[in-house]
Image (cartoon, rainbow, N blue to C red):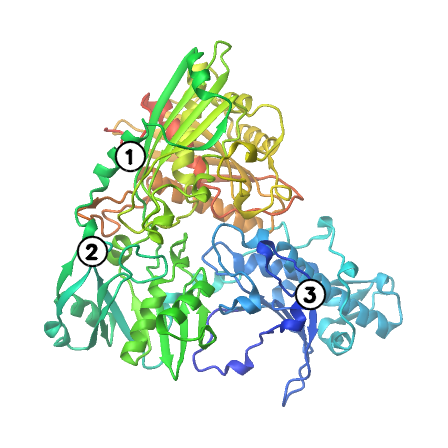
Amino acid sequence: MKSSVLKSPEKDKETTIIYKPGRRDFLKLGSLAATGLILGVNFSCSDRKKGGEITELRSGAYLTITSDGKVIITAHRSEMGQGVRTSLPLIVADELGADWEKAEIVQAEGDEEKYGNQNTDGSFSVRMFYKPMREAGATAKLLLIRAAAGKWEVDESECDTDNGKVIHKSSGKSAGFGELVDLAAALPLPKPEEITLKDPSEFKIIGKDTPIIDLQDIVTGKAVYGIDAKVPGMKIAVIQRCPVVGGKVKSVNDKAALAIEGVLQVHTIEGAGIPPQLHKPLSGVAVIAENTWAAIRGRKALEIEWDLGPNAGYDSDKQQQELLEKTKEKGTVRRQRGDFDKTLKNASKVIEKTYLAPFYAHGTIEPPAALARVKDGKCEIWAPSQHPQWARDSVADALGMDVKDVSVNVTLIGGGFGRKSKPDFIVEAALLSQKSGFPVKIQWTREDDIQHDFYHAQSAQRIRAVIDKDNKVSGWNHHSTFPSISSTSDAGAVQPSDGEMRLGCVDFPYDVPSVRIETHDAKAHVRIGWLRSVSNIHHVFAAGSMLDEIAEARQMDPVANVLDMLGEDRSITFNEEMPQGEYDNYGENIKDYPWETGRLRQVIERVAEKSGWGREMPEGRALGFAAHRSFLTYVACVVEVAIDDRNHITIPNVYYALDCGQAVNTDRIRSQFEGGGQFAASLALNSAVTVKDGQVVQDNFDTYQIVRMPQAPQKIHVDIVESDAKPTGVGEPPEPPFIPALCNAIYRITGKRVHKLPVDLEA
């Protein structure tokens, strides 16, 4: 397996194998991707290369087969450990019948015209491109078979592909793909109705464990991340950003900074102000130097006077208490079924609880870094970008260039979690290269990263559950309030967006006669952004914890309680109960990806079996349970917790059962859930950002803690349901049910419910 991540700056771009489909190609090729983008995946045949003897046959933008036998697959999504540079290409290879061990993987630059949607967010890479990638491989396979059948004078139905060859099944005669390229290039494009996809029973790679193609380079230190990018003449820049969002530079004395050996230039960066925007830098002063150490020393020597702006007095703890008080009031109704007030009057028992969650930082192990070279009216970027097309557009806008004059080369990403889809740090590098005349790498320190992030919003929630005289749950009233992601682009946005509310709140799937879900205003005073699993984090912490409290009030086992509340197996849409419009179902048509309670029931029953739910536990140990559907994937989770006499929490075992439709690469699915469990443990047990006087208090992993080895889940067991349904997301679904499952287990040991994160057993 060969792979290429970062193009050499000196490499002649004309030698890079990239197919650029023109307008005519797009018109004759079908619409094959979600989100309405037209993606060419059928074959286009190239002429012989000038000055060479290699012929290429290309299946759209993703697949090239050369006459010397190479199978080159373009990975157009961003790799951050989730395995997408492996999972998407292996779909093509399996459908084609290629020799996976010999396939070459090339990383695409950011270009929507060539590759369609490249935004690697939202756990949708595989689900969006599963069918187009299969069709690319199947189209190539058909043309190669037709070429071989014509050469051998046999019927094409007698031929198949395997291990990089076309094989005549009855005689055993075979020909390598490269031998057939010239003949295939002369054939007409197959019609869409002629393309036949494999039956899943024929898959050889899909649905199996496949190591990521970058594994060897990663473990040997050869992998190139954004922080590793280099070009000749490159300088390093660090920025002293305004400590309060919306503030700006009043004055700067850079005399001492410029006197430091290695410091070359100092530049002021004008921020967007309020709203701060998702794609623009914060206001600050940049130091450009020969090396990182000189740049950091120069930054420390700067004398800056700030105008801190209107957020200078902001206190996050004070705001959270204010938000909590708001949840006692009537809010904006976001979903309504039945008459909750009437149900409340007829209650036999009412449970009312509140839940608080803090701001979270992304804390990626690789802090933001990007390299830009502005020269001769063009800009070239090397960056760990989750959304290279947005980066390209943002850089073009900031520099006053045409977007065609900006290129973005995507490196490996040392942790993304949504942070590196925002292109603010990439724009910083581009602006400083334009100002200085040098190629410039912007390097964020850990302190920069923690104190100037796009934070997951803190939240306050209040839930009332009604139990009737028959011991049935008859009412559910959920109040939720938190600063919205929309506020980062619109200062007037004070209510959660529809999209945020559809993540674990208004998509409450239980068969309860009366449901009312309400929201309240919350003004943002820091940059709010999306973080792995987004609003599912706080919504499912609250809902999953409350379901456990309901079970106790009903004197039922927690698993039995949830299964009872699910009711009869059915498909649900929520549409008729949402005043704001249709349920968006993570951007997918509900008819294509129905919300099926039976699939949630199945993973609940499986995790109960696999974990030994209900077994007697030693003193100081307990199991907790929660389940949730997010990003179209059904997940049930059981967390085993142990607490010693010093109140130290350990997690001996975590059990997941999941239904993600067709599993493409089971190795990466397990890896995502193993990492997701660790990530969720950090959110539940350690992590919290607080703001005083408008400034983030935490500044490194000593104060913004991620889970340490003694607390980290020791064994994570992942049970994947076999399915031939459409693939769904796996990057974000592990987190939401883990947190309430953990908290519910803690309650069984301590007798104290967790109503505020992070967990504090001394509170």
Picture coordinates of residue 610, whole percent (x, y): 54, 31
Q: Earlier in the sequence, mark 3 or mark 2?
A: 3
Which mark's residue is nearer the viewer, 2 or 1? Answer: 1
| Displayed quadrant of residue 322 | top left
Residue type, label 1: Leu
Disc 2 secondary structure class: loop
Determine which residue is flagged by label 1.
Answer: 323
Between marks 1 and 3, how big is the CA–CA gap? 52 Å
Q: Are marks 2 and 1 in contact (CB under 8 Å)?
A: no
Q: Earlier in the sequence, mark 1 or mark 3?
A: 3
Q: Earlier in the sequence, mark 2 or mark 1?
A: 2
Residue type, label 2: Pro
Residue type, label 3: Leu
Determine which residue is flagged by label 3.
Answer: 29
In this rendering, is residue 559 above or below 133? above
Q: Is residue 302 visible?
A: no
Picture coordinates of residue 122, whole percent (x, y): 48, 50
Q: Which residue is found at the position 47% from the left and 12% from the top?
A: 468
Picture coordinates of residue 67, whole percent (x, y): 69, 78
Outermost residue toward the bottom in this view = 51
Badge 2: few (under 14), some or many (20 or more) residues near its Cα, within 10 Å? many
- The dot on residue 177 is none
Q: Nearer the viewer, residue 53 or 346?
A: 346
Q: Quadrant of the C terminus?
A: top left
Disc 3 secondary structure class: loop
Between marks 2 and 1, how big is the CA–CA gap? 24 Å
Q: Is residue 179 visible?
A: yes
Determine which residue is flagged by label 2.
Answer: 243
